[in-house]
Amino acid sequence: MSEETSEQGTTAPVEGLDTRYRDALLPVFGTPQKILARGEGVRVWDTDGTEYLDLLAGIAVNTLGHAHPAILSALSKQAETLGHVSNFFASAPQIELAEKLLDLAEAPAGSAVFFANSGTEANEAAFKLARRTGRPRILALSNSFHGRTMGALALTAKEAYRAPFEPLPGGVEFVPAGDVEALAAALAPGDVAAVFAEPIQGEAGVQPLGTEYLQALRRLTREHGTLLILDEVQTGIGRTGHWFAHQAVPHVQPDVMTLAKGLGGGFPIGAMVTFGQEVHDLLEPGQHGTTFGGNPLACAVGLAVLGTMWEEDLLSHVRTVGAQFSADVLALDHPLVTEVRGAGLLLGIGLDAPIAQQVAAAALEAGFIVNAPNPSTLRLAPALIITQADLDTFVAALPGLLGAAAPEGEN
């Protein structure tokens, strides 16, 4: 029997949690790799007391790591006043967080924020907004991932995700990511409402679209009067060393941006940001809504996350440690490592064999949490507070992890 330590220091039995999980939860996620009991900073402990260096942060969610004092304080303070007010009312944290996001996004006058509860909901809102242009077609990119609800799934390219739920909402077409000629041809008729794109395609294996393609995307959509909707659910909130990934690319500002994951530092929140009055006016009162969006608790945490990032200059830190980590991995000169893709602390280690899942499993047993978004990529998206020393421990362990998983004769 395992035990879990509570905040008061007492223990409570957690016997048979794996069996209880299987009996009580819908098995859409498969079998959990571990059952976690607590976390602190960039480390977590499972119910057996085993410690792990968390290099995934809930898939780019736990911006400030686990149990950060700023988040605990914000939640406690806000819970003493308002927890939830519905969309019939507003609260100061909601307004302040919207203002802060518009400021960080350098959004022009007339821009606005819609708060949701997740990335897929933010993308659903953007999908509906695009429909309001009156144009019949929407473009998304190959290898895209925008969420699991029906509208967001219609924008997601992976056939295995789509097929069980077809027919999906119509009017969506896919063009090859990175192919400017194909994009131009698809936009040429002038009837495309919007193009959805992720600056770095995280679920595809941390694949950056690249500066030239993003600039072409912005230029061509503007020429054809088409909305550019950037999904920054995984790349936003400092993950790449900029507040939003598109800010690293000159002359690229979207018409709409969607956010979630890191914005709440572990508390569920999503957002759609519109840029400029013309886009702002596409959705009218009553045409979209949500019960929990703009929840005071979520918005108070979002403010705490952004404030802490600013005070601790985490953007600079992310750029520095991310670049050093990438260089250190490549300096291993390991025959199975082909490249390190991504930016900041959203990184994919490319492998020369389809063994990423085996390496991730070996890493877990060695005390490191990473994941394999595809068979030849290891993804790291740790808390932005992670230190160089923490990352060095993984770099030192990586050759052994690769050797344990490598096909015979390749380690």
Image (cartoon, rainbow, N blue to C red):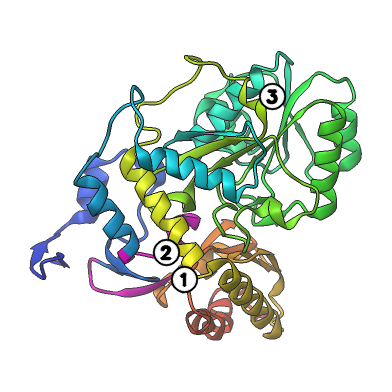
Residue count near mark 3 (Cα–Cα under 10 Å), binned few <14, some 14–19, many ≥20: few
Dots 2, 3 in contact, CB < 8 A: no
Q: Quadrant of the N terminus?
A: bottom left
Which of the pair 376/41 is nearer the observer? 41
**Which amino acid type corresponds to the residue marked 3 in the rendered image?**
Glu
The range drawn in magenta is: 47-69
**Which amino acid type corresponds to the residue marked 1 in the rendered image?**
Ile
Q: Is residue 54 within the magenta segment?
A: yes
Residue 90 seen in the figure = yes
Indicate which disc, 3 or 1, sits on the residue closer to the N terminus: 3
Dots 1, 2 in contact, CB < 8 A: yes
Q: Which residue is mark 2?
A: 64
- SS state under label 2: loop
- SS state under label 3: helix
How far separated are the C-alphas under marks 2 and 3?
35 Å
Q: Quadrant of the C terminus?
A: bottom right
Residue 278: which disc?
3
Q: Which residue is mark 1?
A: 385
Give x and y (percent) for residue 286. 47, 14
Residue at image coords 85%, 52%: 212
- SS state under label 1: loop
